[in-house]
């Protein structure tokens, strides 16, 4: 099991939601931003359901799923999402039937798109990138950070798209003149997301908290030349790891865990389990920040992880 | 012959008339991730096609079965009070639950089969991409859309399923090539470099596809 | 995995600001006759719309260029040209709803909105005139079409000349009607139709295309327009949208279909002006011809399958987006060839 990374930053939840915003920085969970923000009420309800889903997934992943295969973990996130989507859909059905159709048209539409939340990438990606490598407290904090960031973007998108697109807020008509259909259309959603991301970047530049480049930008900048450079860096670090191993005297420090396991007498072979094996690959291929990983993690990454070449 | 025409209609609908990615943002996150990785676009698109088509056909069967068992469903709803079938669109919630459950079972079966295959580079590549390709808003939306449109044609369902993968490939290729252009463009303002420019470029692509769909959302 | 081609494919067509200014001033000079004709046919409203559109584009570029690009980008006159082109594709007058009579001509507001969209969304985020991945005027009008599909195609007839039909040519074609007869052929050429204020006079646009072909700086770009027109004509002949008559689809009807496709909407205007965006076209004249053919094919496809009365701007955006994809596939194919050749050489060397 990989050791805890050094990437846990001690920041406030609000600042984390801003700097590591799941939609505007990490570019995950974009589908709800396009579909579920055509009205503010729908955006709020969708955010609430997604936040609970994310929290529970990260808690479950952190507590019980660390030793599972990544594909089995993904199935668990999906199953949790289905249960939530079904429960929330039933609640909206009952509410819609009680209140009356015309008042809650957008909620009735919501029950058609809630199942998409089960497959939304935000829970799976955050769990695979963070929760399976960290303890419960850090995972809960990460879920809160991402939920706050997700909700903030959904609210802003809902405000703009409903206000400017339909000329209303919460179903209350504000203006008949100022209705620009493009805002509630899907292309308007993409453009608004892009401009919100640019606005966030501008704010980050002004406050100089993170600088210009973020994790997602490094990933977006990726191209084969970078991969070659990255491989050379891994080779260099592996050579450094070999030299470190050679230079370390046998009596100075206890050998790393992997060598201790090899030194032990042959244990009984573990039963092969389909679900329970050390995770060697992630749900999505994430480019590790080489400077943050320890040498053992690098070795595991290079030897155990998949390569495209 | 008519089923083949329906299939072609379904594919054209999914790719052009109402491009699933641009008309609903379905699979947008996975599309952006795949657009960064040149080597995985074809495999991911093929897997999306397969999963969409198979789950669409299975769910079509379930749809027909459930519709024919309406009396039982009404009895169940009467017996258990709050699950009233008189509420508008109640069937959608049940159907969505069943569609998602079928997709989950399909995903688990495929992974179990791949897990027991002999180890190879291709197996590792498959394992990496199956999760992203199968449990995807794009794949789960196909049976939902077919149900919402009350479409019971096998050919149309198959065409839409296969068209989902083709649509994913076309859109990812367009965005991938756009990202290469943007990467070579040093004049992009710093505020827009990276994710913002990519999203704006994707939005303009979506605007281009609006000529087919008229900008109407899928749901 | 073979290495990526190191050389950037997207060299700037307009290398210096002077080149950009010269290009845009030429475009402006070529567009002014159409604007004057619009004023002749539709009166002061046409000028009003054009002026507001240009002003909006200029102000947007002044404000957002300073904010994001940190420099004055007005010197290349591109904002003026974009504003003018969007105005030319709009009706001269759009009546407001009764209760909003004080807002006057709605076309003015739409023109301003389209111009601001073109500058703010299509130009500024990508670094300005020399780096635009899409044609800004096409994107601006596409935005207006998507947002106000009925209003931007609500045309009023000219008070100076009587139109051949009370409906626009594009609408007639969508209904399968043929409006071209030997009696009104020349009237249609001279713009006696209901349509956008700056794109009706077919004869003048043909003359402008000929002028572009004669100009040395524009000749290779005009090949794209030529390819576009030829593709539209060929596909209109093969897949006519005009309803067959009593005698079926005769040769005359097919030829009339070509005429209807070419004169309807803003097709010729888009082919001659919007398609020739330097930053969206390849470098050589024969590849520009191919891009033009692609855009023409997409136009006919959209006219058959699309939703709106006029779809040519969406086809141009699709052609702009398709070009990088074609280059991408071409690069990959070449790299795979090189990679396989090197592998074969290594295998031969190993065997030897």
Image (cartoon, coloured by chain):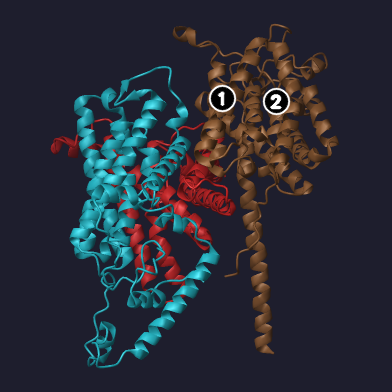
Chain colours: A cyan, B red, C brown
Chain under callout 2: C
The secondary structure type at the circle numbered 2 is loop
Q: Residues within 10 Å of mark 1 (few under 14, many from 20)?
A: many
Report whether residue C147 is seen.
yes
Specify whether A240 is left or right of B159: left
The secondary structure type at the circle numbered 1 is helix
Q: Residue at x 42, y 31 (%)?
A: A184
Q: Which mark identifies residue C242?
A: 2
Q: Which mark identifies residue C56?
A: 1
| Labels in figure, total | 2
Image: B130 above or below C142: below
User: Looking at this view, is A113 or B25 the one in front?
Assistant: B25
**The furthest residue to the right:** C214
Q: Residue at x 71, y 32 (%)?
A: C273
Query: On the rendered image, what quadrant is the C terminus of chain B found in?
Result: top left
Report whether residue A83 is seen.
no
Locate residue C290, reporting x and y percent: 74, 46
C-alpha distance separating marks 2 and 1:
39 Å
Query: On the rendered image, what quadrant is the N terminus of chain B found in?
Result: top right
Locate residue B15, reporting x and y percent: 53, 44
Q: Residue at x 42, y 57 (%)?
A: B133
Locate residue C29, reporting x and y percent: 75, 27
Sequence-wise, the earlier of marks 2 and 1 is: 1
Specify whether C35 is left or right of A109: right
Q: Residues within 10 Å of mark 2 (few under 14, many from 20)?
A: many
């Amino acid at each position: 099991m990989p050791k805890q990374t050094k990437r846990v930053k001690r920041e406030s939840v609000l600042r984390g939601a801003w700097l590591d915003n799941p939609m505007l920085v990490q570019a995950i969970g974009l589908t709800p931003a396009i579909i579920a923000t055509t009205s503010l009420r729908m955006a709020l309800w969708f955010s609430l359901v997604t936040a609970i889903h994310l929290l529970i997934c990260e808690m479950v992943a952190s507590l019980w799923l660390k030793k599972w295969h990544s594909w089995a973990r993904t199935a668990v996130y999906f199953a949790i999402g289905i249960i939530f989507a079904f429960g929330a859909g039933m609640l909206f059905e009952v509410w819609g039937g009680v209140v009356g159709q015309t008042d809650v048209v957008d909620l009735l539409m919501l029950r058609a798109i809630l199942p998409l939340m089960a497959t939304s990438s935000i829970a799976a990606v955050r769990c695979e990138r963070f929760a399976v490598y960290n303890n419960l407290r850090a995972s809960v904090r990460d879920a809160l950070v991402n939920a706050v960031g997700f909700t903030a973007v959904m609210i802003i998108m809902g405000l703009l798209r409903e206000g400017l697109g339909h000329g209303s807020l919460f179903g209350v008509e504000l203006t008949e003149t100022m209705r620009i259909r493009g805002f509630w259309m899907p292309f308007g959603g993409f453009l608004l997301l892009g401009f919100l991301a640019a606005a966030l970047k501008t704010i980050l530049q002004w406050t100089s908290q993170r600088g210009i480049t973020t994790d997602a930008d490094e990933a977006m900048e990726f191209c084969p030349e970078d991969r070659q450079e990255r491989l050379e860096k891994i080779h260099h670090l592996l050579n450094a790891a070999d030299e470190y191993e050679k230079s370390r005297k046998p009596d100075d420090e206890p050998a790393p865990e992997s060598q201790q396991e090899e030194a032990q007498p042959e244990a009984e072979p573990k039963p092969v389990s389909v679900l329970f094996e050390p995770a060697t690959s992630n749900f999505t291929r994430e480019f590790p920040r080489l400077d943050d990983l320890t040498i053992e993690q690098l070795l595991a990454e290079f030897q155990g992880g998949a390569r495209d070449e | 012959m008519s089923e083949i025409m329906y299939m072609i209609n379904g594919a054209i609908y999914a790719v052009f008339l109402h491009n699933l990615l641009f008309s609903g943002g379905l699979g947008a996150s996975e599309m952006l991730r795949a657009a960064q990785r040149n080597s995985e676009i074809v495999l991911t698109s093929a897997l999306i096609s397969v999963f969409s088509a198979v789950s669409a056909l299975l769910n079509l069967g379930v749809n027909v079965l459930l519709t024919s068992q309406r009396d039982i469903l009404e009895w169940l709803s009467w017996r258990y009070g709050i699950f009233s079938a008189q509420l508008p669109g109640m069937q959608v919630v049940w159907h969505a639950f069943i569609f998602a459950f079928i997709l989950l079972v399909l995903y688990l079966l495929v992974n179990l089969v791949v897990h027991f295959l002999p180890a190879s580079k291709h197996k590792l590549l498959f394992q990496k991409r199956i999760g992203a390709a199968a449990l995807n808003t794009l794949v789960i939306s196909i049976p939902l859309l077919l149900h919402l449109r009350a479409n019971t044609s096998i050919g149309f369902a198959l065409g839409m399923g296969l068209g989902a993968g083709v649509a994913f490939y076309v859109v990812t290729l367009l965005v991938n090539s756009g990202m290469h252009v943007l990467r070579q463009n040093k004049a992009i303002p710093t505020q827009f470099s990276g994710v913002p420019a990519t999203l704006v470029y994707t939005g303009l692509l979506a605007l281009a596809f609006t000529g087919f769909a008229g900008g109407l959302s899928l749901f | 995995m073979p290495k990526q081609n190191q050389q950037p494919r997207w060299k700037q067509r307009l290398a210096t600001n002077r080149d950009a200014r010269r290009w845009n001033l030429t475009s402006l000079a070529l567009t002014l006759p159409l604007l004057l004709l619009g004023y002749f046919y539709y009166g002061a409203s046409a000028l009003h719309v054009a002026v507001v559109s240009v002003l909006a584009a200029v102000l947007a570029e002044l404000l957002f260029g300073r904010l994001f690009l940190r420099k004055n980008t007005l010197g290349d006159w591109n904002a003026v040209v974009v504003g003018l082109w969007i105005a030319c594709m709009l009706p001269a007058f759009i009546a407001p709803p009764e209760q909003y009579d004080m807002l006057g001509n709605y076309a003015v507001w739409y023109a301003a909105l389209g111009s601001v969209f073109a500058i703010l969304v299509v130009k500024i985020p990508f670094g300005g005139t020399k780096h635009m991945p899409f044609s800004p005027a096409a994107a601006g009008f596409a935005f207006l079409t998507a947002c106000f599909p009925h209003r931007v195609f609500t045309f009023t007839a000219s008070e100076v000349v009587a139109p051949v039909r009370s409906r626009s040519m594009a609408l007639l074609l969508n209904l399968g009607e043929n409006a071209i007869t030997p009696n009104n052929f020349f009237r249609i050429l001279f713009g006696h139709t209901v349509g956008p204020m700056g794109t009706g006079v077919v004869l003048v646009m043909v003359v402008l295309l000929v002028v572009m072909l004669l100009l040395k700086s524009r000749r290779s770009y005009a090949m794209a327009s030529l390819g576009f027109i030829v593709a539209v004509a060929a596909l209109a002949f093969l897949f006519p949208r005009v309803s067959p008559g009593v005698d079926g689809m005769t040769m005359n009807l097919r030829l009339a279909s070509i005429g209807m496709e070419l004169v309807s909407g803003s097709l010729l205007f888009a082919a001659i002006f919007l398609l020739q965006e330097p930053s969206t076209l390849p470098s050589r004249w024969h590849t520009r011809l191919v891009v033009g053919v692609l855009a023409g094919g997409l136009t006919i496809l959209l006219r058959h399958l699309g939703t709106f009365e006029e779809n040519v701007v969406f086809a141009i955006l699709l052609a702009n987006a398709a070009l990088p994809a074609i280059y991408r596939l071409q690069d990959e194919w070449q790299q795979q060839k090189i990679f396989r050749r090197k592998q074969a050489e290594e295998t031969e060397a190993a065997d030897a």
